[in-house]
Image (tube, helix red, strand yellow):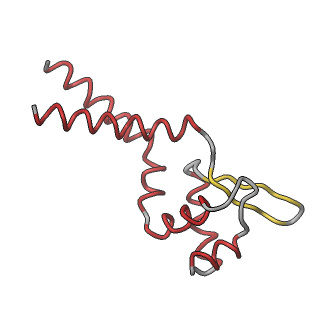
Amino acid sequence: MKDDCQQRIEKITQGFQDCQKVLTAIGDETRQVIILVLLQSDLSGKRVGQIAKEAHLSRPSVSHHLQILKEAGIVNMNRVGTRNYYYMSGNEERWKEIVDLVELVYESVLHIKK
């Protein structure tokens, strides 16, 4: 039982390390607004100006936050000529890591309740 708990804690610790960039990226309120705007587009994406207008943010702010979201692996960019289009990443493995981490924490909380 104690070994099971220790293994669970080790998995959660590793999960936090593996998902740190994503958790930091999605934890910011401005980036959450940008994510919501991008979720309303298709895979052809949206340009910075479009995102700024819909999110009621400045273009420099949107560019800065998009860079963080890209580095976290949850937003991708498609270049068409000189235009950049941003869209939510469909990387299932990345999103699955987050889901697995949250489920592991949830299972631990349920275990504590018992």
Q: Position of residue 91 (x, y in %)?
A: 61, 40
Against 50, residue 26 (above or below) is above
Q: Position of residue 73 (x, y in %)?
A: 59, 47
Quarter of the figure with residue 69: bottom right
Task: Give 79 or 102, whichever is nearer the viewer.
Answer: 102
Q: Position of residue 25 (x, y in %)?
A: 48, 57
The residue under the point 26% across, 23% down is 7
Image quarter (top left, top right, bottom left or bottom right) of the N terminus: top left
Please say if 45 is above or below 96.
below
Q: Position of residue 12 (x, y in %)?
A: 31, 35
Q: Residue furthest right?
A: 81
In the rendered view, does 69 fall on the left or right side of 77? left
Q: Is residue 92 above or below residue 48?
A: above
Q: Quadrant of residue 24?
A: bottom left
Residue furthest left in the image: 114
Quarter of the image for the C terminus: give it: top left
The image shows a total of numbered marks equal to: 0
Residue drawn at the location 40% of the way across and 40% of the way down: 17
Q: Is residue 32 left or right of residue 84?
A: left
Q: In the figure, 111 relative to 102: above or below?
A: above
The residue located at (27%, 38%) in the rendering is: 106
